[in-house]
Image (tube, rainbow, N blue to C red):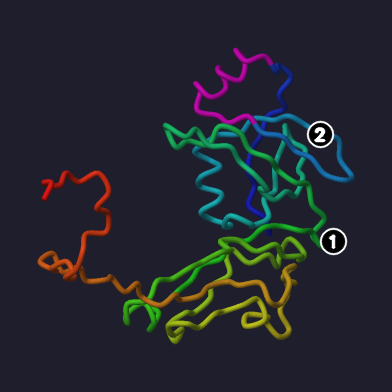
Amino acid sequence: MSTVLQAKERKEFRHSALKAIRKNGDIPAIIYGAKVDNKPVSISSADLTKTIRQVGRNGVISLDVDGSKQDVVLTEYQEDSIKKEIIHVDFLAVDKSSKINVDVRLVLVGDAAGVKDGGVMQQPLHQLAVTSTPDNIPPQIEVDVTNLQVGETLTIADILYQGSSFTINHENDEVIASILPPKVEEEINAGEQQAPGHPDNEEGRETTPE
């Protein structure tokens, strides 16, 4: 059963109207999808935070717009860079029996052996594009890097799940994580003497006539 989130249809789109919505503790949002008309709505910021905690970042939400319910997933959101508050949300209307494409957070877990040996962890990918029915979208994809050694690499091929309920839409050879060798700092001898012989550049030096 989907968690219900209350919403109200928006009919005012001026900047002043959006500002008033946010001042009241709500967030402007939009519902879109292949089989629905785009519908601007507003939702409670507090209720959205509570709902995400309940269903997860990629969970299915039953959005109740003035009494009419629609299953949606949160696809994108905009955040105020200073206040770190969500200021706009996009909801994708979904059919639970139909597959959709979404991005899922990629999380490296464990303390890599190579890092303990002084190596540097590199993570080129921080999210993965997957295809799944809405109810089977994972909240995040975790990859254990505990045994990863210096010079070793993990790719998409290393995390393909047999019998998984979702498909990872990346090439098998794409790198997820790797451990670079530790940097070797050159020791500089501050007291090193110049090699005997003539100076590198004698041009322009004054000489005393014989």
Q: Mark 1 points at which residue?
A: 98
**Type of amino acid at the residue the image marks with label 1:** Ser
Q: Local crowd at mark 2 within 10 Å, few (<14), some, or many (≥20)?
A: some
What is the x, y in percent for residue 23?
49, 21
Q: Residue at x 72, y 32 (%)?
A: 66
Q: Distance between the residues labelled 2 and 1?
A: 19 Å
* Magenta highlight range: 14-28
Looking at the image, which is closer to me, 127 or 2? 127
Q: Local crowd at mark 1 within 10 Å, few (<14), some, or many (≥20)?
A: few
Q: Which residue is drawn at 72% across and 27% down?
A: 9
What is the x, y in percent for residue 107?
51, 67
- Residue 62, compared with residue 139, is above or below; it is above
Check disc 1 and report its element: helix, strand or loop. loop
- Asked if marks 2 and 1 touch (Cβ < 8 Å), the reply is no
Q: Name the residue under label 2.
A: 38
What is the chief secondary structure element of the magenta stretch? helix
Left-right relation of 204 to 182: left
Q: Residue 201 carries which label?
A: none
